[in-house]
Image (cartoon, rainbow, N blue to C red):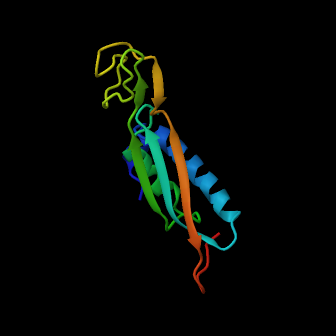
Amino acid sequence: MCTREAFEGKAMHELSIAAEIIDAASVELRQTQGLCAQRLRVRVGGLSGVNPENLRFCLEVARDGTPLGPVQIDVECVRAKVLCPACGEVDCGGRFDLACPRCGGSISGFLGGNEIEVALECEEMEEGRFRAD
C-alpha cells in the first residue's frame, strides 16, 4: 500500500527511478522463455542522490500489477570510493568531502559511489507453474 508521504516530494525522485527499473525488468522478463523472476537486486551508490530506503518502498509500490509482483527486492547502498594521489587511499570512509581521510590531501576523483546497478535473478519455471505476463 502506498502512503501519502511518498507523494509529498519525499520520494518522488525515487518513484520515477523505481518505475523505470520495474518497466525495464518487466520487458526483460517477458523476453525470456521458461524463466521466472525470483529477485530484483539494486545497488545504489552513496553519491547517486537516491535514498535506498525510499527506493525500496517505491519499488515495492511500482511492482504491483506487473510480472515482478512476487519477486524479492534487495536494495544495497554502496559507499563512495575516492582516489588520493598523495597517499593512494581509495576509500572515503563514508565521508563526502574532498579531503583524504588518511592524509588530508585533496582527492583527485571518485572511483565509485554514484552508480545505480540493477540485476534480475531468474530461475527455470517449475513444472505446472506459470509466469504472469
Q: State which quadrant residue 85 falls in.
A: top left
Name the quarter where the C terminus is drawn: bottom right
In percent of width and height, residue 96 lies at 35, 24
User: Measured from the top left, where is residue 109 in percent x and y?
Assistant: 47, 20
Which residue is found at the position 70% from the left and 70% from the top?
Answer: 33
**As displayed, is residue 83 above or below residue 63?**
above
Report the label total: 0
Residue at left 61%, top 79%?
130
Locate residue 92: give its quadrant.
Answer: top left
- Residue 97 point in image, percent of width and height: 35, 20
Q: Quadrant of the N terminus?
A: bottom left
Instruction: Name the foreground residue: 57 vs 113.
Output: 113
Q: Residue furthest bottom?
A: 128
Q: Is residue 40 left or right of residue 97?
A: right
| Among the 4 quarters of the image, the one containing residue 100 | top left
Question: Residue at the location (42% across, 55% down)?
Answer: 74
Residue beneath the point at 64% across and 62% down: 29
**Furthest residue toward front:** 87
**Closer to the camera in the image, 25 or 113:** 113
Q: Is residue 96 left or right of residue 112?
A: left
Return the x and y of residue 93 as percentages of the image width and height.
Answer: 30, 30
